[in-house]
């Protein structure tokens, strides 16, 4: 992901109100202040010495080694695991190789702004509550007993039956906030949407049903996890159940095929059944002897003073909803009145097939045209329904609308279009001038270079205050998470079709909004993803360290 132009942004000098004022303010107030602060931010040098630890770890917690093949380990690895080996050659800002040292890095399955990965995962099963230790691909037990009912009671839309796993996704705010300041909240909210799309893609080969929850009691969730909400907080909860009638977990054999089910117990220093930690009456999690609290090494710092607009907006998302079921505006802009372009039928694409092949395009694309039928398949997959909080999400995204900037698409005139999912068609919004207007905006050099060679750009848009009357400031997170889900579905579908993509968040700017016809309206661009054909010569080479559940032999 390419979060923004120039150096890291510094927030305006004025500060938001106190936490008490945040809770007393009208719904949407914190969102308005946050948006204004982001719009007015200015560049500042990045202090890399302030970078916190990249991985969270509970050194005194009993450990569970995840067995290869069983679905809990495959799911966690496919979301956040260390699964890629990346050979890097030195390159300039637009991705062209330059003299310098070569180095090797370890990558993850899904993209993250600045490769900083602020999201942590906490799975709860019938036998305990754990933290996923990414660095060692294992579980660290932080609570004994079945926490799933406690989590599901917090959800605005609780499942009919207790799921096999409840997976809480949290954001460590300073992990990307040291670089992106308050803008880090937008990136984290979109990243949980990206991970939700990744989970939905993995659910197919793993035989799982996944439901995405953004609307829940966040303060209570953080208490269950023992978190300091001002430092790390729960942004999304996934409820996960098996599709198999046997009640046993789906198991993948070494060749990726479903094998005979087996109980998930883990191996190593402790099994789930052997974990003896318990929570005392104050909610503090203790070790075997009951004397040592299970605490993380190097706990993340509070961002209340460091990132005041982020902290104020997140605090506002945690308060009770203002008017349950109350009115809301239209999150999507009015459709353009231009000509209708009928799209060819879209043959379904298996999103899991794109997982192993996904790699962000570092230095642009081959300037080759994209077939209209392939664009149609990407758009159909991107706008498909998903199991979420909003009642109509099974029929398609409800908080965002999708625009397409066509540059090199066979059979489609260059210009700007709005995708209409219900009729599988494009509505023309602007001609080729839109390409010039967007290219003339405040873009980073690598975005500007990639835009010249991309085949198409997808731009989700919406009103960040449309649902404030119904959801309060939580609407901001709901919408940003859906934007992340939408763009990652496009990424996986493109990868499955032999294409590549990259998110360039600096493309969401006033010039883009003007091209979309959104100036002086409540709507704005939410993300900006470039799609095209990968270049055969590039300064990085990414290969899978092991085959994930969604990867087929190629």
Image: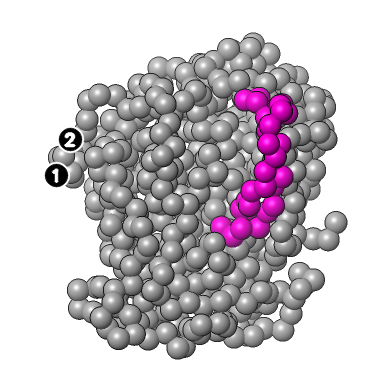
Q: Is the Cβ of the residue at disc 2 closer than 8 Å to that at disc 1?
A: yes
Is label 2 in a helix, a strand or a loop? loop
Q: Which residue is mark 1?
A: 20
Is 355 placed above or below 457 here? below
Mark 1: secondary structure: helix
Q: 224 left or right of 46?
A: left
Any mark on residue 86, and which?
A: none
Q: Residue at x 37, y 62 (%)?
A: 297
Q: Residue furthest right?
A: 554
Q: Answer yes or no: is residue 426 visible.
A: no
Judge left or right: residue 94 versus residue 471.
right
Gap between marks 2 and 1, in whole Å? 8 Å
- Give the labeled residue for mark 2: 17
Q: Which of these two is toward me, 185 or 403? A: 185
**Which quadrant of the view contains residue 431?**
top right
Q: Quadrant of the C terminus?
A: bottom right
Residue at 51% from the left image edge and 82% from the top image edge: 269
* Image-based side of 388 in relation to 35, left or right: right
- The percent position of residue 226, horizontal first and vertical second, equals 30, 65
- Which of these two is toward me, 228 or 351? 228
Is the N terminus in the top left, top right, bottom left or bottom right quadrant?
A: top right
The magenta span reads: 80-109
Q: Is residue 105 magenta?
A: yes
Image location (x, y in percent) of residue 362: 68, 34
The x and y percentages for residue 89 are 71, 36
Which residue is located at x 76 percent, y 73 percent?
Answer: 254
Q: Residue at x 76, y 39 (%)?
A: 499
Q: Is residue 525 magenta?
A: no
User: What is the x, y in percent for residue 272?
Assistant: 48, 83
Q: Quadrant of residue 68?
A: bottom right
């Amino acid at each position: 992901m390419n979060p923004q132009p120039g150096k890291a942004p510094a927030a305006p000098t004025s500060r938001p109100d106190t936490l008490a004022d945040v809770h007393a303010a009208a719904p949407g107030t914190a969102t308005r202040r946050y948006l204004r602060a982001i719009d007015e931010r200015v560049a500042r040098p990045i202090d890399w010495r302030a970078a916190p630890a990249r991985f969270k770890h509970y050194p005194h917690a009993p450990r569970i080694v995840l067995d290869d093949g069983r679905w809990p380990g495959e799911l966690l690895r496919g979301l956040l695991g260390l699964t890629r080996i990346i050979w890097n050659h030195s390159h300039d800002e637009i991705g062209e190789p330059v003299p310098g040292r070569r180095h090797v890095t370890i990558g993850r399955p899904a993209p993250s702004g600045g490769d900083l990965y602020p999201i942590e995962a906490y799975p709860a099963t019938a036998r305990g509550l754990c933290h996923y230790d990414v660095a060692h691909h294992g579980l660290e037990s932080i609570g004994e007993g079945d926490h799933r009912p406690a989590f599901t009671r917090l959800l605005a839309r609780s499942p009919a039956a207790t799921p096999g796993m409840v997976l809480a996704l949290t954001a460590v705010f300073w992990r990307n906030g040291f670089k992106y300041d308050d803008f880090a909240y937008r990136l984290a909210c979109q990243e949980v949407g990206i991970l939700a799309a990744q989970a939905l893609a993995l659910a197919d080969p793993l035989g799982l049903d996944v439901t995405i929850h953004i609307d829940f009691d966040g303060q209570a969730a953080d208490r269950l996890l023992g978190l300091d909400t001002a430092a790390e907080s729960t942004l999304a909860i996934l409820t996960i159940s098996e599709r198999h009638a046997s009640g046993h977990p789906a198991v993948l054999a070494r060749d990726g095929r479903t094998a005979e089910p087996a109980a998930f117990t883990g191996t190593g220093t402790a099994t789930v059944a052997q974990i003896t930690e318990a929570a005392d009456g104050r909610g503090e999690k203790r070790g075997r002897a009951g004397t040592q609290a299970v605490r993380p090494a190097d706990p993340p710092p509070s961002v209340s003073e460091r990132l005041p607009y982020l902290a104020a907006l997140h605090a506002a998302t945690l308060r009770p909803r203002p008017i349950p079921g109350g009115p809301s505006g239209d999150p999507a802009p009015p459709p353009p009145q231009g000509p209708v372009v009928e799209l060819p039928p879209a043959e379904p694409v298996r999103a899991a097939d794109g997982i192993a092949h996904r790699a962000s395009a570092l230095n642009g694309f081959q300037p080759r045209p994209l077939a209209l039928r392939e664009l149609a398949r990407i758009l159909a997959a991107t706008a498909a329904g998903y199991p979420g909080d909003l009642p109509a999400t099974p029929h398609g995204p409800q908080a965002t609308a999708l625009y397409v900037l066509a540059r090199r698409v066979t059979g489609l005139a260059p210009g700007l279009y709005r995708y209409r999912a219900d009729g599988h068609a494009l509505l023309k919004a602007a001609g080729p001038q839109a390409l010039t207007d967007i290219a003339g905006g405040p873009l980073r050099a690598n975005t500007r270079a990639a835009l010249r060679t991309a085949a198409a750009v997808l731009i989700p848009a919406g009103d960040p205050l449309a649902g404030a009357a119904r959801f309060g400031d939580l609407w901001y997170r709901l919408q940003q998470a859906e934007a992340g889900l939408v763009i990652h579905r496009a990424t996986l579908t493109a990868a499955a079709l032999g294409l590549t993509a990259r998110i360039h968040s600096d493309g969401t700017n006033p010039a883009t909004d003007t091209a979309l016809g959104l100036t002086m309206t409540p709507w704005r661009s939410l993300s900006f993803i470039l799609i095209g054909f990968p270049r055969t010569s590039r300064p990085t080479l990414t290969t899978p360290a092991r085959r994930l559940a969604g990867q087929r032999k190629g």
